[in-house]
Image (cartoon, rainbow, N blue to C red):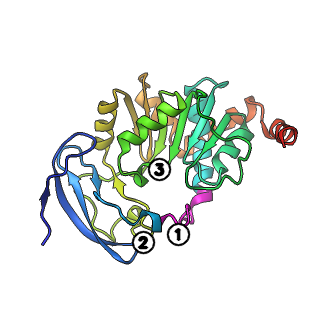
Amino acid sequence: MVNTTINLACSICNGESTHAFRTRVLRKYDVDFFQCVDCGYLRTPEPHWLKQAYSNAIAVADTGVVQRNTDLGHIGSTLLYFLFPKKGKFLDQAGGYGIFVRMMRDIGFDFYWADKYCENLFARGFEFHPGESYTAVTAFEVLEHVSDPVVFIQETLAAAKSDSLIFTTELFKGKPPEPGQWWYYAFETGQHISFYEHRTLEAIAKHLGKHLCSNGSVHMLTDKPVNSLLFRVLTSTPAARVLRLLPSIRMSSLTMPDHLRVIKNS
């Protein structure tokens, strides 16, 4: 019998956690998930299967990886163009195969790649180097993979010497959807272990002393407040598909300079 209340302090707000549901993970493990009664953070306390889950860094079932990078390229370039210095230096944390970094450099943004678990295929030569400072960090589809989001964000921003994180994760509201009723759980892959409500992100922002902007699945934590209406416009997919033409037209692509740089350094 499952204990419906456990002595598990929420790592975000220190609230009490109650049992949400039990489900099958990786088609072999029966796992209990618990939700914080105060901030809504939904997680499992001991994801012991992660080594198996990450035998392939990018899950085979992730058929949306290319489309996701295309959409994020539109939104990301629009956000950075309008909210950050165009000559800034940017880092994509947990950047996967490097598709997003290459797309952003092709537009003209000075982007770099970091990922502990995946091979850099498309942005080789433009990896993160400790000690360098970055204007902003992106972390797309990452927070659902981490067991302690506050520590992850703190360590990521500290390593990049940055005060701004742009990230994506799908949100639920109120009672968590039942297993099998929300595609985002992806329990078959075993890689998603943390899930959030909007109030969870608000609690993270409060814990870190940062301002939160949020629209759908796109979110930003930063030291300086940003107009919420402007953020919603810039992160609207239809608007971003139009507005992203500005950086594409006005910025100088790094495709050829990168080609020459890689040849020189090889």
Q: Residues within 10 Å of mark 3 (few under 14, many from 20)?
A: some
Q: Residue furthest bottom?
A: 28
Image quadrant where residue 118 sits: bottom right
In the image, taking residue 144 as reference, residue 258 lies left or right, namely: right
Give the magenta-colored segment's residue range. 53-67
Count of numbered badges drawn on the protein: 3
Per the model, the C-alpha gap separating discs 2 and 3 is: 17 Å
Give me the disc on residue 260.
Answer: none
Q: Residue at x 48, y 37 (%)?
A: 156
Per the model, the C-alpha gap separating discs 1 and 2 is: 9 Å
Residue at label 3?
142
Q: Position of residue 66 (x, y in %)?
A: 63, 58
Residue at label 1?
61
Q: Circle 3 — which element? A: loop
Q: Residue at x 57, y 46 (%)?
A: 72
Per the model, the C-alpha gap separating discs 3 and 1 is: 16 Å
Image quadrant where residue 213 sits: top left
Q: Which tag, 2 or 3, sits closer to the chain's start? A: 3
* Residue type indicated by callout 2: Glu
Q: Circle 1 — which element? A: loop
In the image, taking residue 122 as reference, residue 134 lies left or right, namely: left
Q: Position of residue 23 (x, y in %)?
A: 29, 71
Q: Most prominent secondary structure in the magenta stretch?
A: loop
Quarter of the rendering occupied by the N terminus? bottom left
Contact check, label 1 and label 2, Cβ < 8 Å: yes
* Residue type indicated by callout 1: Ala
In the image, taking residue 90 as reference, residue 145 lies left or right, namely: left
Q: Residues within 10 Å of mark 1 (few under 14, many from 20)?
A: few
Up-down: is 18 above or below 152?
Answer: below
Residue at label 2?
188
* Residue type indicated by callout 3: Val
